[in-house]
Amino acid sequence: MESAMIERIRASAEALRPRMEAFLSDFLKIDTENPPGRNYEKCVRFLGEKMRSLGCEVEYVEVPEEALASLPEESKGFPRYIVVGTFKGTRERPAIHFSGHYDVVPAGGGWTVDPYGGLIADGKIFGRGASDMKSGIAAQIFALETLQHAGIPLKGSFVSSAVPDEETGGQPGMGYLVRSGRLTKENTDYCIITEPLDPDMICLGHRGTLWFTLTFKGVQSHGSMPSEGLNPIEGMRALLERIDRRIRPQLECVSAYPVSPERSRKSTLCITTIQAGSKVNTIPDTCSASFDWRLIPEQSVEWAKGEILSICDDLVREGVILEYAYTPIIEADPTMVDEDQPLVDALKTCGKAVVGKEMGINFSPGMDDQRFAVHEGGLGAAVVYGPGRLALAHKSDEHIAVDDLVKGVEIMAAVAAELLGTKERQ
């Protein structure tokens, strides 16, 4: 990437700074909390109109009912939408596809500003989704506008999409985008998921995720005669004790991959919900608990699931519980791509030119939409890069520094120009 090209991109991004601020502020004012999934159509129309103003062919996709089986109960009846904007250069290929999710986690408490006010103050933009990850979507759209403002015509195709429901697993969002054939190795050469893993970092993958519920069956009895029953709560206690003895020592292995933050370089297994009983003097007949197990890249869902079910089988055989039911919520193996490839090289080169230092390499502690592009879309050239900061995601007073937003736009614009080619460069 020639320094003259970088300077043109930087000058144009700086000129567009006020427009970026206003756009992201308005974007954050659209409450897209998930669950349940409010204002999704309003959100994609807002984004689509901006894409259309830049000359993109815009497609609005309503996710069909049969693809919504994974929706939680509180989201039933709320439709899901995807928007895809395509700007074609002088030829269709190569094609780079930027994608981000527009749903956000519930605002929660502890805010000192309106989480949906879009406040701009002290060089920052505040709101739920400011870091994770409406800023990423804003940056990918403004990367195209920056190239146009700079008078840099592209040869290949620049695609930008926004999907729902990453915060609840991603199946109706990026999962459907990939399964519907809109993002696969057949039509895409490079993919960047614009999640917040810090503006000077390139993310090559993420830990695996095993979310599941276990329901233990016992025998109901009067609380004054517990020997007449079989308490499944005691069975759950026994499970937790055996997890501590048999599984936790195996979680001390430190990953060789640079997972961020450093504390996440080990596998983590947490019990997150538990339900049992209806009355103080009745031994319940069932006990259910949910678990969140994050797997380092060296581990697999198959291994983790086998460890848990082995313990459950022992509890049944020993008569601690009558039977059990395992219900998967999400089973996603770790995702990783090769660092030695043109997409990563372009991000390193352009990132260094913009931020003035070497870009870091990391892996995400949690899963994200990259896994769909890699595992189902067949794309080896699919990484995560966005302007937001991971440490601010899901927190009260979530925000993004405008400087980070602008730098992210500059890097994305430069990468697109480098990989797609421009008419000015033969």
Image: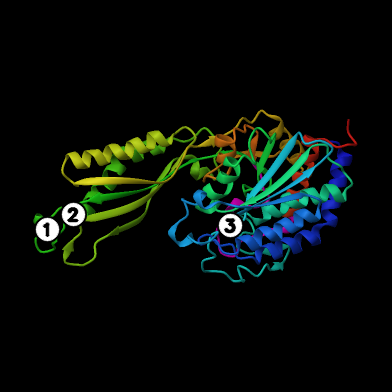
Residue 188, placed above or below residue 18: above
| Left or right: where 281 falls relative to 54 | left
Q: Is residue 107 left or right of residue 402?
A: left
* Image height of 340 relative to 265, above or below: above
In the rendering, at what x and y percent does residue 32 appear? Answer: 59, 62
Residue ID at (50%, 60%) = 35
Amino acid at circle 1: Pro
Residues marked 2 and 1 touching at CB (< 8 Å): yes
User: Mark 3 to mark 2: distance in Å?
Assistant: 41 Å
Q: Is residue 389 magenta?
A: yes
Within the image, what quadrant is residue 16 found in? bottom right
**In the rendered structure, which disc, 3 or 1, sits on the residue that comes first in sequence?**
3
Q: Which residues are magenta?
A: 384-403
Q: Tag on residue 103?
A: 3
Secondary element at image label 1: helix
* Residue identifier under label 1: 226
* Secondary structure category for the residue under label 2: loop
Query: In this picture, is 10 found above or below 17?
Result: above
